[in-house]
Image (spheres, coloured by chain):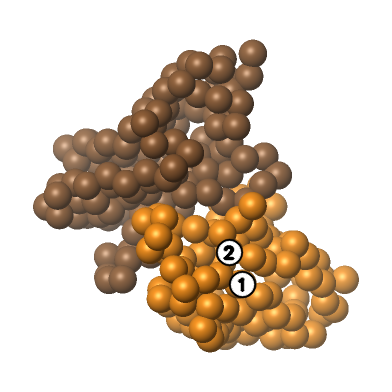
């Protein structure tokens, strides 16, 4: 069974930074494409970005609102996904979910973690 | 403003059939598969349908999906109280090069 456990959320001032982590188990993490999806309080889902497996180039794609401020990375030796968030804005307040892509193509958003809450406020 | 358009809410009585629509464009639904997720209150979203109409194991056949042109729909037959949740459609947008979602539809079982 796939388990995804996010951590690192909290309260941060506007302009600040946070590093979120997602510990994965129950899957071949090094071959997995991984995503971050966020959900502002009382709002819908918004894709943040994706990192491909290293064997497929490790390419990272971001949504327009976070490009240049957020960085997705992975440590396959620790089965862990990261989201470095910089220059945070109040609009970045959300629950951040770690999401796997399916193994089969065309890949889709498959398994979701329980999320970690990031609150940007002074 | 979401790229995909869903009705904010739908409702039905137990046993009834409800349909949730999802409208997109030629850069997303028109050329890509549609996926549906449901989110129970206070929990993470969960995959409900993949590749337009495929059910993951464990999803009852009361849930079905279809796609035509730039629109898709989710149908729930034999509505049950435990179906009360938020439902989201999603797909890959080729112009934005990213996943896009509908704004979500809150299903209320009366």
Output the chain of dot 1.
B
* Farthest residue, direction right: B110
Q: Determine the secondary structure under disc 2.
A: loop
Q: Is residue A20 visible?
A: yes
**B24 sits to left or right of B82:** left
B25 left or right of A104?
Answer: right
Q: Residue at x 78, y 70 (%)?
A: B10
Residue B86 appears in which quarter of the rendering? bottom right
Q: Position of residue A109 (x, y in %)?
A: 41, 60
Position of the C terminus of chain B by quadrant: bottom right
Q: How far from the left and from the top, in percent, is residue B16?
A: 79, 85
Q: Which mark is residue A56?
A: none
- Look at 27% across and 70% down and name the residue there: A104
State the CA–CA distance, disc 2 to disc 1.
6 Å
Residue linked to disc 1 = B22
Quadrant housing residue A36: top left
Check the rendered structure and report the hue given to chain B: orange
Residue at the spot 75% in from the left edge and 76% down from the top edge: B80
Which disc, if any, is residue B4?
2
Marked residue chain, label 2? B
Q: Nearer the viewer, residue A91 or B19?
A: A91
Whether discs 2 and 1 lie on one chain: the answer is: yes
State which chain is coloured brown: A
Q: Residue at x 56, y 15 (%)?
A: A13
Residue B36 visible in the shown view: no
Percent position of residue B36, x then y: 54, 69
Q: Nearer the viewer, residue B98 or A10?
A: B98
């Amino acid at each position: 069974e796939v388990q995804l456990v996010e951590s690192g959320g909290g309260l941060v001032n506007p302009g600040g930074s946070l590093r979120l982590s997602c510990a994965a188990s129950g899957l071949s993490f090094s071959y997995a494409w991984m995503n971050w999806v966020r959900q502002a309080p009382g709002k819908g889902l918004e894709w943040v970005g994706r990192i491909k497996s290293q064997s497929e180039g490790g390419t990272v794609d971001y949504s327009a609102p976070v490009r240049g401020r957020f960085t997705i990375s992975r440590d396959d030796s620790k089965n862990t996904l990261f989201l470095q968030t910089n220059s945070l804005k109040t609009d970045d307040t959300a629950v951040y979910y770690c999401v796997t892509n399916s193994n089969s193509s065309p890949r889709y958003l498959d398994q979701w973690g329980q999320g970690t809450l990031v609150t940007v406020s002074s | 403003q979401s790229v995909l358009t869903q009705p904010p809410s739908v409702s039905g009585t137990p046993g009834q059939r409800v349909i949730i629509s999802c409208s997109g464009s030629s850069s997303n639904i028109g050329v890509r598969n549609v996926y549906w997720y449901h989110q129970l209150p206070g929990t993470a979203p969960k995959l409900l349908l993949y590749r337009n109409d495929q059910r993951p194991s464990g999803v009852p056949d009361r849930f079905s999906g279809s796609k035509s042109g730039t629109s898709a729909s989710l149908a729930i037959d034999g509505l049950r109280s435990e179906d009360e949740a938020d439902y989201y459609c999603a797909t890959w947008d080729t112009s934005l090069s990213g996943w896009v979602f509908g704004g979500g539809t809150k299903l209320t079982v009366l």
